[in-house]
Image (cartoon, rainbow, N blue to C red):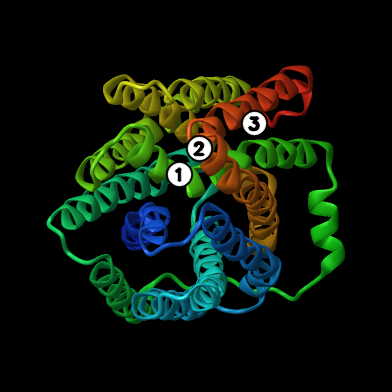
Amino acid sequence: MASTTKKIWGLSTFNATIKGITTGIFFFWAIYFASIGFSGLQIGAIFAAQEITSLISILPSGFINDRFKSKDLATIGLIMLAAQFIGISYFHTFPMVMMFAIIGGIGHRLYAISADSIFYKTIEKSQATKRIAVYQSLNYLFIGLGIILSGQVLQLNVPFENLIKWGGGLYLVMAGISQALPRTITTHFDLLKYKSDIFRPKVLFFLAIVFLFSIHFGAEGTSYGLFLKNTLGLENQWVGLYMGTAIFLMGFWAILFSRMLEKIQVKTLLFTGLIFSSIGHILMTHPDPVYSWLFRVFHEAGDAAMFVFFAYGISSMFDKNRIGGNTSIFTFITIIGGTIGSALFGPLGEKFGYNLPFIATGGVIFVAFILALFMNRYILHHPKD
């Protein structure tokens, strides 16, 4: 138990650092691309290209994580992310940025699935909620700090290209450290076993909720920073504080919901997450930045509940020997939703206002809530329920 606890804390801290670097810069991508003259259509295309590349690489990444050592694959993914960041810092033409977005899309997905595979293969099911609390909460705390720090650095008029170079350098350092991550079990590839894992009513319902919920990620990727900067009129420093503090608080929401999950039904967590996320996403378009931020915090509380629900579902429904491949199927559905959101809401936000993508995708999340109400018999349960 003590050994597993140390492994989970080490992995969680490592992964949270990577998340902080990635998201701290990623949330300013759209603002940066607009500043170097890219149109809303081009920005949407860049995000969509990265998502589509991720989409193509997800399933292979998951399956090879069950066949090979996940920490070696994580190292390769981090090197590819370093190449993306360093490349974009030097080349500013649309074709070159697209090329590096594709490289980064593969690298990001390979790393993310490898890290998740290590986590799910290391935890004990009896301790799942406690381990999820550590893994998820550190992610959000570091992501929030990363965004806040990036905003503060940019406010000092540090060129964005320098920030990207620093991020690329940190990826290379972390690639070396990644070899100290826990070793994972491997298994022979058997497609029929993955098929039998997925084609169960509870799993298919789970994936339907994942798809509808993930559409709003595309809206955030293409429109969030631009909404704060162009619609609310915030400077980079305040954009970072707005985003970062809301996500930082998700760390505490994740701990709260993980602990609550030991006492409440899983469906209660799901309903709470969907309602909070939907309402908060719509109302964060309030024109006053303070009220907008408060509703954003409400939305992020819902997102935290959903991420705890997803993590618990994955750890509960799938065999550890095939959890890399099964996690990749979950991620595959997530990226499909995000890609659709990116393709739709990049140009839509530019043409009709950056508040519209949040209102529309808040409505989509509410549709997921209605679906969950009518099909609640397919929601997974605690063994004790």
What type is the residue that disc 1 sits on?
Answer: Ile
Q: Nearer the viewer, mark 3 or mark 2?
A: 2
Residue at disc 2, secondary structure: helix
- Identify the residue at horizontal 36%, vertical 22% (top origin): 287
Mark linked to residue 308: 2
Residue at disc 1, secondary structure: helix
Residue 133 quadrant: top left
Frontmost residue, 86 versus 207: 86
Does 157 sit left or right of 131 as displayed?
left
Residue 253 quadrant: top left
- Identify the residue at horizontal 47%, vertical 38% (top origin): 129
Q: Position of residue 377 (x, y in %)?
A: 78, 22
Mark linked to residue 385: none
What type is the residue that disc 3 sits on?
Answer: Pro
Q: Position of residue 19 (x, y in %)?
A: 38, 57
- Mark-to-mark CA distance, 3 and 2: 17 Å
Residue at disc 3, secondary structure: loop
Report the residue marked by disc 3: 383
Frontmost residue, 241 versus 112: 241
Does 260 sit left or right of 54 as displayed?
left
What type is the residue that disc 2 sits on?
Answer: Val
Earlier sequence position, callout 1 versus callout 2: 1
**Labels 3 and 2 touching (C-beta < 8 A):** no
